[in-house]
Image: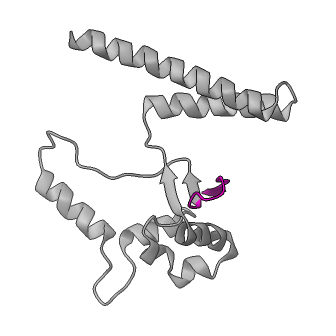
């Protein structure tokens, strides 16, 4: 997670490149059991202890996405977590869902980042290339989707 520079007058935001989103797929054979698991996983333990999700995030050195859990002493008292928790609590946070399109965009961002680092292009030119390349790919995908619907 990192703060995003924003123009004057725009509310500050933070960006997290990926985010875990638990869901129950359509057609799941046991949706009630899946829902019960998710409810258990994200709920505080009896007596007010942290949720299993919070413990899991702590174990993998991540912060929980819920501000109430990210505010736990174990996250805010550890400098490795605190810098990210502060951003989470101070700003609206956005992230990209994990899809083929976002993977394509991430790959293109990485390619252009390397070009900037090795002084093969400017940051401004790299951004234009990312926008043009990703938008062209999205147009191709949209065209393919529309053809399959016809």
* Left or right, 68 with reference to 8: left
Task: Classify the position of the C terminus by image quarter.
Answer: top left
Q: Residue drawn 51% across and 48% down?
A: 18
Q: Residue drawn 40% across and 79% down?
A: 50
Q: Which residues are magenta?
A: 1-12
| Type of secondary structure dominating the magenta stretch | loop
Instruction: Examine the image and state in which quarter residue 121 appears.
Output: top right
Instruction: Examine the image and state in which quarter residue 139 appears.
Output: top left
Residue 99 location, x and y as percent? 42, 34
Q: Residue drawn 75% across and 27% down?
A: 125
Q: Residue furthest front?
A: 9
* Left or right, 141 with reference to 116: left
Q: Which colour assignment does the render follow?
A: one colour
Residue 106 location, x and y as percent? 58, 34
* Above or below, comparing residue 144 to residue 103 in the picture: above
Residue 23 location, x and y as percent? 28, 50
On whether residue 76 falls in the magenta region, the answer is no
| Number of callouts | 0
Task: Classify the position of the N terminus by image quarter.
Answer: bottom right
Q: Residue drawn 31% across and 81% down?
A: 45
* Above or below, comparing residue 69 to residue 125 in the picture: below
Residue 143 location, x and y as percent? 37, 13
Q: Nearer the viewer, residue 35 or 19?
A: 19
Q: Residue furthest right?
A: 119
* Left or right, 149 with reference to 84: left
Instruction: Examine the image and state in which quarter residue 109 appears.
Output: top right
């Amino acid at each position: 997670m990192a703060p995003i520079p924003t123009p004057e007058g725009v509310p500050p935001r933070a960006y997290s490149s990926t985010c875990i989103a638990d869901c129950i797929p359509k057609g799941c054979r046991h949706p009630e059991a899946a829902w019960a698991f998710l409810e258990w996983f994200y709920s505080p333990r009896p007596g007010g202890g942290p949720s299993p999700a919070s413990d899991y995030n702590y174990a993998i050195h991540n912060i929980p996405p819920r501000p109430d859990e990210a505010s736990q002493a174990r996250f805010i008292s550890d400098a490795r977590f605190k810098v990210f928790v502060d951003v989470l609590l101070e700003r609206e946070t956005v992230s990209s869902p994990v899809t083929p399109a976002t993977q394509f965009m991430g790959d293109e961002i990485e390619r252009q980042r390397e070009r900037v680092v090795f002084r093969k292009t400017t940051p401004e030119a790299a951004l234009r290339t990312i926008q043009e390349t990703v938008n062209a790919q999205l147009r191709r995908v949209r065209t393919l989707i529309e053809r399959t619907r016809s």
